[in-house]
Every structure is written in structure tokens, then in C-alpha cells.
Image (cartoon, helix red, strand yellow):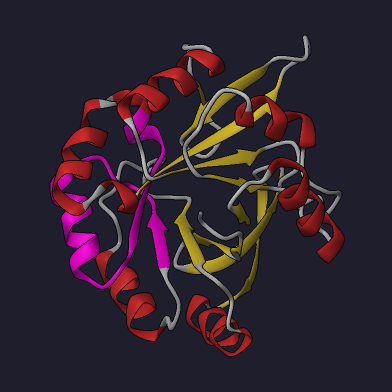
Amino acid sequence: MLRSRVIPCLLIHKKGLVKTVKFRNPKYVGDPINAVKIFNEKEVDELMVLDIDASKDKKEPDYDTIRYIANECRMPLCFGGGVKTLAQAKAIIELGVEKVAISSGAIENPSVLREISATIGQQSVVVVLDVKKNLFGSYEIYTHNYTKKVKKGFDQILNELEQIGIGELVINSIDRDGSLSGYDETLAEHVRNLVTCPLTILGGAGSQDDILQIINKFKIIGAA
């Protein structure tokens, strides 16, 4: 059985490290490499780095930045941002990254998940879904850094991902992003009831108690 992990998530915007609140107003908070060095000293379980510009700006993954981070990182590393193809995923893995995170690419072309899994291994394929609750209380998925709403229903996409088979699913709450108000437990429960794949919840962590509660209550493997 997989043990639970605490996973710092670093957001890269214009090559700098930023903090956002509900995906808005990115505030520069430092150099990504310095942050990686700090988390090396903290001996965290895993590190997730997401380039929030790449897909939105229709750019390739920033291989130079990935190389620098991978060379410095002393824990398992997951990188996402601009990944659309098998060739891109292979290039990222070859730079020393353990997992490749795919967001809009997984929505636009789900078959690429099978291709990447077959080549680099299912355990290295992570799908990140940015999710927001609408006025009617239902959850909707957005891509391209909260600029495009996905037409397909949330549950339909979860079912499709379950059928494809992925290494890990990261559910990122837009409503809780940067709020430090705790995870969206209703969202976590909804997803946990629909999928069996390893699950990580992102967005809202403000204390150690928040992390312990989400792990113990829903038996997820990752608190990001």
C-alpha cells in the first residue's frame, strides 16, 4: 500500500516562483532554485513544480528550467506545464524528473495518456485537474490557468481517466488556491468515491492539522 506524502507545490510564472489566490494575481515570492534547496533541507516526500504559463501561452515545456530544478532536487520530482505529446514527456523524464504532470493535454487528447504510460510507465503519468464549484454547487474543470472552461462534465472526465488508467490524479481546487483555509473536503470525497487511482489534493492547506485531516479522512496518498 502506498504511504501518504506531503508535497510542496511550486508555481512558476515568468521563470519566477509565485503565489496566487484563486488562480489570480500571481505575486513573486522568490527564485525556484532557492525554494528547492530549502525543501531539500526539509526532506519533504516529493516536490511538484507547475509552469502556469506554458499551456496558456502555447509554449513548449521550459527544458532549461526543468534541467536546473532536476539537478538541484534531492527528492522525487513531478513537473507539469505545456506537456502535450509523448516526445515532450520523454524529454522531461530524460532530464531526471520522476513524474510528468499533464493538464489541458489530458483533456484535449486523452489518448496521449496511454502513449506516455506505455513508454515511460503508468506510475510516471500524473493528471492535474483544476476544479471550481459553480453557482449550482456542481464542480467544473478549467484549463489554461483558469481561462478556459471544459465543456465535458467533471464526473465524465473522472470516469474516462479511470478507464484509461493513470499513475496519479491531482485535484486542484481553484476556490481554495492560496486561501490557507483548509482543503475542500466535499470535493475530495466526491472524487474519492469515483476513482480508485492514487489521489492527491491541492489547494487550501494552511496548517499541519489540515494535512493530517485530509489524509486520515479520505486515505489519499498526497496532500499538496
Nearest the eye: 150 or 97: 97
Give the extent of the magenta segment.
Answer: 77-106
At 55% across and 72% down in the image, what residue appears?
Answer: 45
At 52% across and 28% down in the image, what residue appears?
Answer: 195
From what the image shows, is residue 1 above or below residue 30? above
Is residue 81 rendered magenta in the image? Answer: yes
From what the image shows, is residue 71 above or below residue 9? below
Is residue 196 rendered magenta in the image? Answer: no
- Image-based side of 174 in relation to 146, left or right: right
Instruction: Point out residue 106 in the picture as x, y percentages from the top left corner.
Output: 34, 32
- Image-based side of 213 in relation to 127, left or right: right
Q: Quadrant of residue 76?
A: bottom left
Instruction: Point out residue 107 in the picture as x, y percentages from the top left corner.
Output: 37, 26
From what the image shows, is residue 110 above or below residue 79? above
Instruction: Point out residue 180 in the picture as x, y percentages from the top left corner.
Output: 82, 54
Nearest the eye: 64 or 203: 203
Nearest the eye: 195 or 86: 195
Nearest the eye: 94 or 58: 94
At 38% across and 51% down in the image, what residue appears?
Answer: 81
At 45% across and 18% down in the image, what residue appears?
Answer: 159
